[in-house]
Amino acid sequence: MSLPKKVKIVEVGPRDGLQNEKETISAEVKIELVNRLSAAGFPNIEAASFVSPKWVPQMATGSEVMQGITRKPGVVYSALVPNMKGFEAALACGVDEVVIFGAASEAFSQKNINCSIAESIERFREVAQAAKQHGKRLRAAVSCAFACPYQGEVPLSAVADVVRRLRDLGCDEIDIADTIGVATANQVRPVMETAIREFHIEGLSGHFHDTYGQALANIYASLEVGISIYHSSVAGLGGCPYAKGATGNVATEDVLYMMKGLGIETGVDLDAVSDAGQFISRHLGRKSVSRVGNALAAKRQQAA
Ligand SMILES: CC(C)(COP(=O)([O-])OP(=O)([O-])OC[C@H]1O[C@@H](n2cnc3c(N)ncnc32)[C@H](O)[C@@H]1OP(=O)([O-])[O-])[C@@H](O)C(=O)NCCC(=O)NCCSC(=O)C[C@@](C)(O)CC(=O)[O-]
């Protein structure tokens, strides 16, 4: 199969990227980050998370962030929502797309959202109905589609099962996530093909963490099976609080550079993303982990 000519990049840095930071990051900084990212041309930005602040304190400012950003017409601003309490909060501040988040691993489901997979689907059913009623887009994440930090191997049948159940809730998009960044390219085809059998390919996305440095290879392998939506995080920020040791998502700058080299259209301005990456890295007091972002910054410094 030839590679897609165009892909959608969903920028998840403001949510997935920042949720694990120990030091509190002010709403102002998050707002500036989201604004810089929308100016860079992303069609979809995961801007917040409406979860329990006891579980993920860094995301407690979700409403402030959503209310403070400059909404760019056409951009879909998404937020994670585990239950109706989260949905009501997301609705009140004008989130465009709610993201329910389940797992293909029972153990991870328990650690992350404190319930079994079957219980999570029942909670999500209510959220899904409310989302449809209010005209909101509905996306679902499938964590641990490749491996689980608690139970290890995750069978393909578990991926198929949860994708099917989420499809039946009426999801517009379903994210196939390598939560701990351990997958290699050979694993991608069977997992993605399993998901494709259960859900329309145009709505499936690849959400790869880069713990073992395999994310770009895994994205390439996903392109080869026709997946055309990818999640990434500016400056490679991130890590899941309930997946210890896992590093951030693949860096957006690296993904954009690869897509450009492959002649695949994203509509996103790499230089502007690179600037946003340097902005947030400066704020966090550490170097970006994006190889491309750092190379571009060094090149510009040399030229100045
Ligand atoms: C799902 C719960 C809430 C269950 O947590 P629980 O303790 O079972 O919930 P509960 O209903 O018993 O409520 C406990 C307390 O939380 C409050 N609460 C309840 N819900 C909310 C809410 N929505 N917003 C704000 N507060 C809430 C509720 O009001 C109560 O407050 P208290 O009475 O004790 O003061 C909890 O487990 C939770 O918040 N988990 C979130 C974990 C999380 O955010 N993980 C990271 C995101 S997932 C991820 O990163 C993976 C992904 C998506 O990127 C893909 C991948 O890479 O795999």
Image (tube, grey):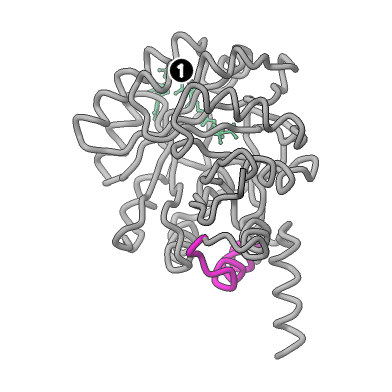
Against 156, residue 99 (above or below) is below
Q: Is residue 186 left or right of residue 126?
A: right
Range of the magenta residues?
A: 266-281
Badge 1 crowding class, 10 Å Cα cut-off, few under 14, some 14 to 19, many 20 or more, is: some
Q: Main secondary structure of the magenta part?
A: helix
Task: Report x, y in % for residue 201.
Answer: 48, 35
Q: Is mark 1 within 8 Å of ligand 1?
A: no
Task: Report x, y in % for residue 142.
Answer: 54, 26
Q: Is residue 278 magenta?
A: yes
Q: For the C terminus, give its image quadrant.
A: bottom right
The residue under label 1 is 164
Q: Is residue 108 left or right of residue 58?
A: right
The single residue placed furthest to the bottom in the displayed view is 304
Pick the residue in front: 232 or 225.
225
Task: Report x, y in % for residue 299.
Answer: 74, 80
Q: Number of callouts in the render?
A: 1
Where, by quadrant of the figure, is residue 112 drawn? top right
Task: Report x, y in % for residue 236.
Answer: 66, 53
Q: Residue at x 44, y 55 (%)?
A: 27
Pick the residue in front: 163 or 292.
163
The single residue placed furthest to the front in the displayed view is 1
Q: For the N terminus, give its image quadrant.
A: top right
Callout 1 secondary element: helix
Q: Is residue 285 magenta?
A: no
Where, by quadrant of the figure, is residue 106 drawn? top right
Give amino acid for label 1.
Arg
